[in-house]
Image (cartoon, rainbow, N blue to C red):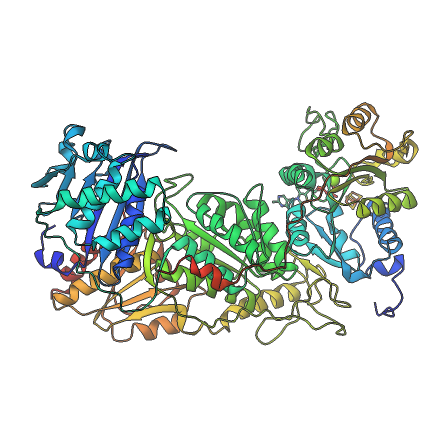
Amino acid sequence: MNAPVATLPAAKDFKSDTKPVWCPGCGDYGVLTSLARALADLGFRREEVAIVSGIGCSSRMPAYTNCYGFHGVHGRALAVATGLKVSRPDLTVIAAGGDGDGYSIGGNHFLHACRRNVDLTYIVMDNHVYGMTKGQSSPTTEPDWDNALTPGGTGLRPFQPLVIALASGANFVARAFSGDIIGTADIIAKAVKSRGFSFVEILSPCVTFRPEQRDWKELARPSPVAPTDDPARAARRIMTDDGFNIGVLYAGDRKPYQPEIGRARRSLQDLAEEFAR
Amino acid sequence: MTSAARTKASPGVSVAMTGSGGSGVMTAGNMLLEAAALAGCYGLMSRTSGPQIRGGEAAALIRLAGEPIEGHDDRFDLVISIDWLNLERFAAEIPLDSKSIAIGDPGQGEPPAAMLGPVTRRLALPMKALAKKIPGGRANMIALGYVGSLIGLPEDALAEAVRRTLGAEGDRLTASLAGIEAGRLAAAGVDCPHRLAPRRSDGAKRWLITGNEAAGYGALKGGVRFVAAYPITPATEMLEWMSPALSGLGGVLVQAEDELASINMVIGASYGGTPALTATSGPGFALMTESLGLAVAAEVPIVVVDVMRSGPSTGIPTKSEQADLNIALYGVHGDAPHVVVAPNSVADCLTTTHWAVHLAESMQVPVVVLSDQSMGQTRMLIDAPRDKDFIGERAVAAANGQDYKRYALTPSGVSPMAIPGTPSLMYTADGLEHSERGTPSSQARDHLAQLDKRERKLRSADFGLHWAEIEGEGEIAVLTWGSCTGPVREAIARARTDGVAVKLVSLRLLSPSYPDRLAAALEGVKRVLVVEQTHSGQFYRYLRAEHALNAELRAMHRPGPLPMRPGDIHRELVEWSRP
Ligand SMILES: Cc1ncc(C[n+]2csc(CCOP(=O)(O)OP(=O)(O)O)c2C)c(N)n1
Ligand code: SF4
Ligand SMILES: [Mg+2]
């Protein structure tokens, strides 16, 4: 707080002094650091950015930043972010949350946010589990992952967020890994800069309920191929990789949805004319 | 239908125009209403149709009068059927009696006996045959000319109404003008006791508007510039009217993917500083309730209009009921103080929705507006609305303040809101319980302090004069709300001609309750008749729970889909007034 107005905030200025509730070692700490770094790298002032979320461990993000924040209800972050961005195109709006929040209870909004292509960035911290409710299967959990609510696993095929985003019209699709602070910051910065709906899926381990995800740091690696603007190629790559290729996987140039606002061509009096008799 | 005095006290003429879909009864009905406007009358029209999406039977229900009217009469004076298709389906909606006149086309076969049973006078009008003689002629225009002439609407008003609808020239206009002329000629010499006494315009401006349009206009007047919504009958027309209107004013309407999205988009826009609204009906409103609680907790002003239809579940989508009262009052989890208001006429849809924006903005709270299908979809001639100076001001925090606390505990409970973009005031709005600063807190003292604060905003507010409509004096009062108010007012006028004085109290402010004001309004009243359109008596129970009513109470509640009729309320009042 109280940084001199003339100097732009540094990465640390984008973090608040509220102590996260996250478990020690949770991947979300890394995402917070990367996000702060990306915003500083992009030269934002803190008041120009709004971070919007739903409910979950990962959805606690807004209060840990020093930007404007909105911590709403489970699954509706994208709807709040859409209303905010469409009515305030001058703001940079980032939605953030978990795999349960975004792909399960908020799944419908995810599809339509991709279709609508509002100039937003959507960060999902995917840990293949419901962390906050203490370890149930999420849409991205492996079918045989044993847990108390669905003993022996759900038996269901995991959701494929990146292909679905692509098929639904997202204009920018990337995968990141929370352990790679600088790489993730770079991807977030690219996503924020890209106009239209940018989707960043961040593999972010839940060390408490999925301790085996600590191994992700061995598996995650930069994507061997350059980003494409051909959705068919991007889809083929995403569907055939092992889920650990990191980088920008698709970058398109579809026009964002942004109705013109703020310029009145008519008055209330004009509107009343239609009723007068 | 027993009292002749009642019929005398019912102003105006009621006309039902019926026919199969595509026969043009709605067009003709709208033109009749336009003609009445030109003749300086008041009037209204509602539409009803069979379950088919397109086609099928349809009826335009019209009432015209020299004085302001707010609802349908108990019965219809004239029914004119271009064909008799399924007319009997409307039997309950178009009550006819021995004084009614039925007009039909002899070329369309026999009229349905069950429907026209009590009608003693039937007139034959060969609408199809007459239309055939006019190039491009249509039966609905013959009907319009005939009815307009029978009830005494001036010829030039009818012709001008047709011109205004169809434009200044063209084949269709020529054919239509010829059609109404042929209808008028056919009516020559037919004696009709149901006649309007048209008032020449007194120069006072009138508006022709539906409740849905009026609510939309009121919202814009209140400053709403962002709407997100999902289509649902009978709220859709409000949104369809608002969409181009908003873009003209520099605002925007977003079609959301569902109601969960609509209300959250609206919350997002309002958090960003733009007054915002969504409109829906029962099923959509039910989906919104979780986020209504979010708006309470995060203190984000929003307006949610519920144009009520018959429920539960999908219910009867095209018919009115007041049975969303309970969910509007009590449907939010947790202790969640919010405002519920209700317009009580088509015209009041404008004022009360305008007021709702003011309340939401000034208290930073969600406001639910309970309109309903009957107000929303009735097109009515009203006096041009007078300007109300509600000021929808939001308390906004000044830039570069020190030590900003978004949820600061203030005497009024309202704390200045920082608008994103403002330097130095960054905070996180939260549905989690929080401290004054907005940081999540599960401390007992923070919870209590914030619960008290949110409650205080409503309890300490001055809702001004608009909280209720209070008219007349009497030892009997009718306590009602919403669209029941029109029929109640008419019933009270009839009771007056019987020598029974009745006071009207129609509540616009339903939550928070306003016990002192209501007690004052009912001072000296010995009996209170509670009138509402629900099956279970939701309003009655709410009054019993929230108010110490020191009068003898009687509850009159019935479900939709049929409208509350003034005659039934009048009968109840007269009976009850007997010692
Ligand atoms: C309407 C509703 N249903 C259920 C919950 C309970 N709930 C809170 S967080 C959560 C799942 C969170 O999982 P995810 O989004 O993956 O976030 P994570 O905790 O893993 O970061 C659930 C089911 C809720 N808060 N609201
Ligand atoms: S439960 Fe898992 S996701 Fe939640 S904070 Fe702990 S490690 Fe992170
Ligand atoms: Mg998760």
Image spot of residue B566 (x, y percent): 21, 56
Instruction: Residue at 66% x, 59% y: name it.
Output: B272
Question: The C terminus of chain B is located in which quarter?
Answer: bottom left
Image spot of residue B508 (x, y percent): 39, 64
Q: Is residue B100 left or right of residue B505?
A: left
Quarter of image, ligand 3: top right
B159 is higher (above) or lower (below) than B361: above
Instruction: Residue at 73% x, 57% y: name it.
Output: A90
Q: Is residue B225 left or right of residue A172?
A: left
A126 is higher (above) or lower (below) than A19: above
Asked whether B467 or B214 is in front, the reply is: B214
Asked whether A16 or A267 is in front, the reply is: A267
Query: Does the image show residue B558?
Result: no
B393 is higher (above) or lower (below) than B161: below
Image spot of residue B112 (x, y percent): 16, 32
Asked whether B419 or A196 is in front, the reply is: A196
Instruction: Residue at 34% x, 72% y: name it.
Output: B519
Query: Does the image show residue A79?
Result: yes
Residue B452 occupies which quadrant of the picture? Answer: bottom right
Q: Is residue B169 left or right of residue A146?
A: left
Q: Is residue B577 left or right of residue B242?
A: left
B38 is higher (above) or lower (below) than B167: below
Image spot of residue B162 (x, y percent): 31, 48
Tally of numbered tags = 0
